[in-house]
């Protein structure tokens, strides 16, 4: 699905269909309570803007000592930029699919409302999550049609609060508290503290880095992922 959408986006003349197209790639290393040592993550994403609408899609590959699927996540999101009482806002709808294990998949759908200024950023939203056995696992374990093979988490709150500190025309530092990331959504009580730096290499290219610490959370240490990571990436505007 990711490759098909990327092909469709890049098959059209960029200047006639989309006003802007970006490629975002990053690599990440870290350790957490389920990685069995250090892990490595590699992500590629493509975004395209059409008037006030933006579509973004991409995936994550994950390598660790644990027996996790290498292709770890796929995400598709749509954004609309608008103004309310002269306040610039962005509303985002997203779909996130993750093979939680060889047998179990995770699907999230949700929406976010965000505001960004020179020094502050804020996002609030909701998502709903499904865990379910894939068809291969259903056949392997011999589940009958009367057996429940999924768990539904109806509502989960999502949040991000960020502070931006520009230190030069090209460099900006960032500090955030959030319970979600590119391909991860945690419980409300499982916050991530993230420090970052963005460097504008030129008019077309932005370099960024993040250091993140994911809390174990309140009363849920055994069911949520927690640990630290270091990420380095680049955003390239290709038109």
Image (tube, rainbow, N blue to C red):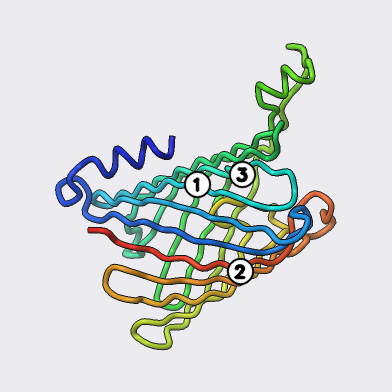
Vertical placement of 170 versus 71: above or below? Answer: below
Q: Secondary structure at mark 2?
A: strand
Q: CA distance from mark 3 to mark 2?
A: 19 Å
User: Which tag, 1 or 3, sits closer to the chain's start?
Assistant: 1
User: Which tag, 3 or 2, sits closer to the chain's start?
Assistant: 3
Residue drawn at 69 percent across, 30 percent down: 132
Q: CA distance from mark 1 to mark 3?
A: 11 Å
User: For this view, does 48 lie left or right of residue 59?
Assistant: left
- Foreground residue among 77 and 11: 11
Residue 129, quarter of the rendered image: top right
Vertical placement of 156 versus 86: above or below? Answer: above
The answer to whether mark 1 and mark 3 are in CB contact below 8 A is no
| Disc on res. 70 | 3
Vertical placement of 58 versus 143: above or below? Answer: below
User: For this view, does 100 lie left or right of residue 12?
Assistant: right
Residue drawn at 37 percent across, 70 percent down: 206
The answer to whether mark 3 and mark 2 are in CB contact below 8 A is no
Residue 213, quarter of the rendered image: bottom right
Residue pointed to by mark 1: 59
- Foreground residue among 205 and 50: 205
């Amino acid at each position: 699905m990711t490759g098909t959408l990327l092909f469709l986006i890049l098959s059209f003349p960029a200047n006639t269909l989309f006003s802007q197209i970006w490629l975002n790639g990053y690599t990440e290393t870290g350790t957490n309570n389920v990685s069995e040592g250090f892990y490595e993550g590699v992500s590629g994403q493509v975004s395209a803007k059409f008037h006030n609408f933006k579509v973004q899609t991409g995936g994550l590959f994950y390598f660790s000592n644990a027996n996790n699927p290498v292709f770890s996540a796929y995400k598709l999101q749509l954004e609309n930029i608008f103004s309310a009482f002269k306040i610039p806002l962005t509303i985002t709808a997203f779909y996130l699919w993750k093979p939680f294990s060889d047998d179990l998949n995770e699907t999230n759908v949700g929406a976010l409302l965000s505001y960004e200024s020179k020094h502050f950023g804020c996002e609030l939203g909701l998502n709903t999550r499904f865990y379910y056995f894939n068809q291969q696992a259903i056949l392997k374990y011999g589940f009958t049609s009367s057996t429940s093979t999924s768990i539904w988490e109806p509502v989960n709150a999502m949040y991000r609060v960020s502070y931006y500190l520009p230190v030069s025309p090209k460099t900006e530092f960032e500090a955030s508290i959030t319970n979600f990331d590119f391909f991860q959504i945690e419980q409300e009580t499982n916050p991530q503290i993230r420090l970052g730096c963005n460097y504008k290499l030129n008019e077309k290219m932005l370099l960024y880095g993040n250091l993140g610490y994911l809390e174990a959370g309140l009363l849920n240490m055994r069911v949520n992922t927690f640990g630290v990571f270091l990420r380095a990436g680049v955003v390239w505007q290709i038109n």
